[in-house]
Image (cartoon, helix red, strand yellow):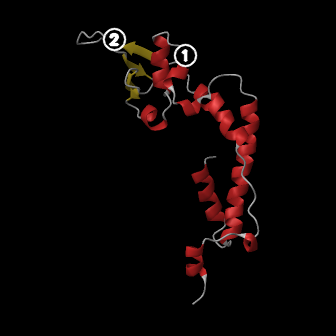
C-alpha cells in the first residue's frame, strides 16, 4: 500500500485520535515498510527492482516506418495491448498511455516495442532510481527512528512564540 492510501485509511479510522498517536502510527508504518523493503533489497538478484521487472508484458508491436530520411534512426512503434493501440517512441522515451513520462519507467507498451527491436536490456528504459543497487542503497542504509516523548522535543525558537500562551 502506498503512503497516501495508508494515510487516508489511518485518518479515516483515527479522526478523534490526538495528533501524536496519529504521527506515531504513520512512523510505525513507514518503519515496517523500510524493514520489509530492506529484506527484499538484500535478496535481489537482478539489476532492476521487482516493480520494474513486472512491467515486461507481451503484446503486439509494429514498427511505424520512418517518413523522413534521417541519419539517426527513429524507433516509433504501434503497440496493441488487446484493448487499445498506443504509440511508443523509444528514442523520445514516450508512450501515448502517459505512464513512461510520469513514472520514469518504461510501461509494458515500451517494453513490448523494445523486445520487438531485440533490445533486451530494459535497464536502459528506466530511470536510475529503479535500479536494484539504488533500491538497496535506500532501504538498507536508511532507518526510521521512533519519536521521542513530547517532553524531549526540540522546538525552534520561532515556533515557541506561536505555541506559548499569551
> Are there few (<14), some (14-19), or many (20+) residues within 10 Å of tag 2?
few
Examine the rendering and report whether any part of residue 57 can be seen.
Answer: no
Label 2: element kind: loop
Q: Residue at x 72, y 48 (%)?
A: 143
Disc 2 to disc 1: CB gap under 8 Å: no
Foreground of the two, 147 or 110: 147
- Residue 10 on image: x %, y %: 65, 60
Earlier-in-chain disc, 2 versus 1 = 2
- Residue 75 on image: x %, y %: 37, 15
Q: Is residue 10 toward the left or the right of residue 145 in the image?
A: left
- Residue 62 on image: x %, y %: 39, 13
Label 1, on which residue?
A: 121
Determine the image quadrant of residue 55: top right
Label 1: element kind: loop
Foreground of the two, 83 or 154: 154
How many numbered badges does the structure rendering display? 2
Q: Is residue 133 toward the left or the right of residue 63 in the image?
A: right
Which circle marks residue 105 in the picture?
Answer: none
Gap in angstroms between the C-alphas marked 2 and 1: 19 Å
Q: Residue furthest front?
A: 157
Q: Residue at x 40, y 28 (%)?
A: 95
Q: Is residue 38 above or below residue 57?
A: below
Is the C terminus in the top left, top right, bottom left or bottom right quadrant? bottom right
Q: Is residue 97 toward the left or the right of residue 71 in the image?
A: right
Q: Is residue 34 above or below residue 158?
A: above
> Are there few (<14), some (14-19), or many (20+) residues within 10 Å of tag 1?
few
Q: Residue furthest left?
A: 68
Label 2, on which residue?
A: 73
Q: Residue at x 46, y 24 (%)?
A: 109
Examine the rendering and report whether any part of residue 94 can be seen.
Answer: yes
Foreground of the two, 16 or 117: 117
Amino acid at each position: 500500500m502506498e503512503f497516501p492510501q495508508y494515510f487516508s485509511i489511518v485518518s479515516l479510522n483515527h479522526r478523534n485520535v490526538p495528533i501524536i498517536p496519529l504521527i506515531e502510527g504513520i512512523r510505525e508504518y513507514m518503519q515496517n515498510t523500510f524493514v520489509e523493503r530492506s529484506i527484499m533489497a538484500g535478496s535481489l538478484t537482478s539489476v532492476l527492482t521487482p516493480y520494474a521487472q513486472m512491467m515486461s508484458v507481451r503484446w503486439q508491436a509494429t514498427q511505424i516506418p520512418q517518413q523522413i530520411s534521417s541519419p539517426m534512426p527513429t524507433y516509433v512503434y504501434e503497440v496493441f495491448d488487446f484493448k487499445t493501440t498506443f504509440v511508443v517512441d523509444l528514442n523520445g522515451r514516450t508512450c501515448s498511455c502517459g505512464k513512461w513520462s510520469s513514472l520514469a519507467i518504461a510501461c509494458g507498451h515500451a517494453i513490448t516495442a523494445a523486445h520487438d527491436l531485440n533490445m533486451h536490456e530494459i535497464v536502459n528504459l528506466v530511470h536510475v532510481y529503479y535500479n536494484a543497487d539504488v533500491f538497496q542503497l535506500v532501504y538498507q542504509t536508511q532507518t526510521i527512528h521512533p519519536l521521542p516523548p513530547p517532553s524531549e522535543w526540540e522546538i525552534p525558537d520561532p515556533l515557541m512564540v506561536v505555541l506559548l500562551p499569551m
